[in-house]
Image: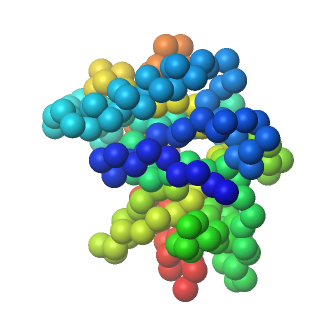
């Protein structure tokens, strides 16, 4: 059984499983105490009730606010938390013929059939083995004025970060031959950089590819 996330305010944060033997696993690093996870949940629920209009750094596309961060290999990415609906452990995916290679197929999530995208394949990264930390982030995307849910497979989920406007830099200029319009900005967090994604643009065309 795949347990849903907290979904207050239309967004979600992972609930830690009772044991490692369950069919999905802890979304946080093993060195995080359960009390810290509970603290994140409480912080998020409280913030959705008092959230003010987000600030935007002049010239930047990305807004400050809460981002769910995740990893693909050594690279870390961030999604706007309000785009996230659930995080579940990796589950069996039913392949759909004649779809792009990055579309793994569909899953039945509590009666709703949703497409699942392998984000590694979408980003032309090498394939990786499924581990106990592999999970599917269910996000809500909007295409052609229609909102629907899609799952993205990631290596592991890291944490929910509150990123301020002064931490966000514009996406790098990679030249006219490199398409990077799906990057909202680059978040400086300590000594690391998180790539903030526009998930609508990352998954553009996914509905059409399924017919």
Residue drawn 28% across the image and 26% down it: 165
Residue in the image at 72% along x and 83% along y: 97
- Observer-nearest residue: 40 or 58? 40
The foreground one among 79 and 178 is: 79
Task: Note whether 142 is above or below 67 in the view shown.
Answer: below
Furthest toward the right, the residue is 129
184 and 105: which is toward the camera = 105
Q: Position of residue 6 (x, y in %)?
A: 44, 44
* Residue 133 place in picture, x, y as percent: 72, 39
Residue at position x 76%, y 36% in the image: 20
Which quarter of the rendered picture does the C terminus lie within?
Answer: bottom right
Name the residue furthest bottom.
211
Residue 129 is at least partly visible in this image: yes
Q: Identify the image quadrant of the N terminus.
A: bottom right
145 to the left or right of 6: left
**In which quarter of the view is residue 58 placed?**
top left
* Display colour scheme: rainbow
**Horizontal placement of 97 versus 195: left or right?**
right
Please indicate, yes or no, whether residue 187 appears anywhere in the rendered image.
no
Q: Position of residue 128 (x, y in %)?
A: 80, 47
In the image, farthest residue toward the top = 190
Question: Relative to 99, is 76 on the left or the right?
Answer: left
From the top left corner, tell me how far across and down residue 53 is, in percent: 16, 37
């Amino acid at each position: 059984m795949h347990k849903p996330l907290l979904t207050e305010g239309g967004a979600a944060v992972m609930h830690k499983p009772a044991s490692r033997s369950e069919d999905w696993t802890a979304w946080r690093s093993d060195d995080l105490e359960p009390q810290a996870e509970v603290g994140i949940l409480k912080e998020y629920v409280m913030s959705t009730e008092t959230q003010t209009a987000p600030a935007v750094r002049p010239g930047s596309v990305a807004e400050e606010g809460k981002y769910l961060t995740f990893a693909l290999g050594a690279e870390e990415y961030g999604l706007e938390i309000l785009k996230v609906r659930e995080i579940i452990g990796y589950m069996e995916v039913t392949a759909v013929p004649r779809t792009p290679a990055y579309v793994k197929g569909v899953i039945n999530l509590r009666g709703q059939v949703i497409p699942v995208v392998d984000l590694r394949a979408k980003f032309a990264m090498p394939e990786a083995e499924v581990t106990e930390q592999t999970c599917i982030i269910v996000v809500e995307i909007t295409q052609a004025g229609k909102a629907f849910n899609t799952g993205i497979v990631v290596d592991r989920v890291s944490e929910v970060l509150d990123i301020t406007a002064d931490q966000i830099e514009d996406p790098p200029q990679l030249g006219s031959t490199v398409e990077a319009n799906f990057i909202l900005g680059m978040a400086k967090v300590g000594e690391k950089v998180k790539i903030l994604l526009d998930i609508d643009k990352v998954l553009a065309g996914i509905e059409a590819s399924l017919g």
